[in-house]
Amino acid sequence: MNILVADEAWIAIALLLHEHPNAEDFSLGEIRDRARQEFHDDRPGVWQHIVSHCVASNRPNPAQYRMLHSTGRGRRRLYLQGDPVHPERKGKILPEKRDIPERYHNLVDWYLGEYSRRRGPAGGSNIPAVALQFVGLIPAYDLQKMAEAIRSGCERVDANEW
C-alpha cells in the first residue's frame, strides 16, 4: 500500500506522542527521523509536509491539510480543534483508515477518542481574534441551513404553553 506523505507525517507524530506521552511537541528533525524509521521513505515530500503543507495555520501551497500545528519555530504537534487555521484550509485533519495500513488504525482511534479530548483548548473567549480562528471550519452551505432552521422556530419556547 502506498501511503500519502501527509499521512506518513501524521503517523510519525502520533507514534512519537505514544512513545513520549509527556511531550507536547517535537522538532522537525525528530518527526522526519521517526517517519524514516517507520516507513524507510526518503521522498522529499515528507519533509515538505512536516514543515509546511500539513500545518493548519499556513497559507495553503498547494495542500489544504490541517493535520499539524506549529507550536513554535521548528516544532510541531498534531492539530486540535480550536488551533489557528488559515481560512483557505479546508482539508483533512487525520488519515482515513482506508488509506493507511491496518496496523496504524489504532492511532486514528486514539486521536479521536483520547488525544483530541485530553488536549483540546480549554474554555471559551470573548476575544475577537480567538473567534476568527474558527472561520471556515463549517462550510457556508451548512451555516445557511443552520440559520434557516433557527429562523423557522427551531427550539422556540412559547410562554403560553406553560
Image (spheres, grey):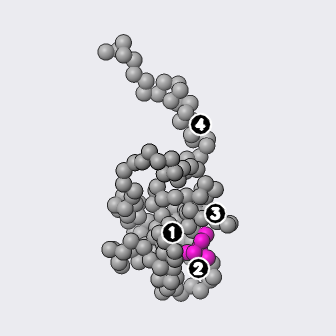
Q: Please give the name of the residue rendered at 65% of the width and 63% of the height, measured from the top-left corner.
A: 60
Q: Secondary structure at mark 2?
A: helix
Residue 120 locus on image (x, y percent): 39, 58
First reached walking from the N terminus: tag 3 or tag 1:
3
Whole-angstrom CA distance, mark 3 to mark 1, is: 13 Å
Whole-angstrom CA distance, mark 4 to mark 2, is: 39 Å
| Foreground tag (2 vs 3) | 3
Q: Is residue 52 magenta?
A: yes
Residue corresponding to mark 3: 59
Whole-angstrom CA distance, mark 2 to mark 1, is: 14 Å
Q: Is residue 3 visible?
A: no
- Amino acid under disc 3: Arg
Q: Work out whether residue 50 or residue 86 is closer to the camera in this orientation and state it.
A: 86
Whole-angstrom CA distance, mark 3 to mark 4, is: 26 Å
Q: Work out whether residue 2 or residue 122 is closer to the camera in this orientation and state it.
A: 122
Residue corresponding to mark 1: 70
Residue corresponding to mark 4: 144
> Over which residues does the magenta segment extend?
46-53
Residue 53 locus on image (x, y percent): 61, 69
Residue corresponding to mark 2: 47
Q: Is residue 143 visible?
A: yes
**Looking at the image, residue 43 lies above or below residue 82:** below
Q: Secondary structure at mark 4?
A: helix
Number of marks in the rendered image: 4
Q: Secondary structure at mark 1?
A: strand
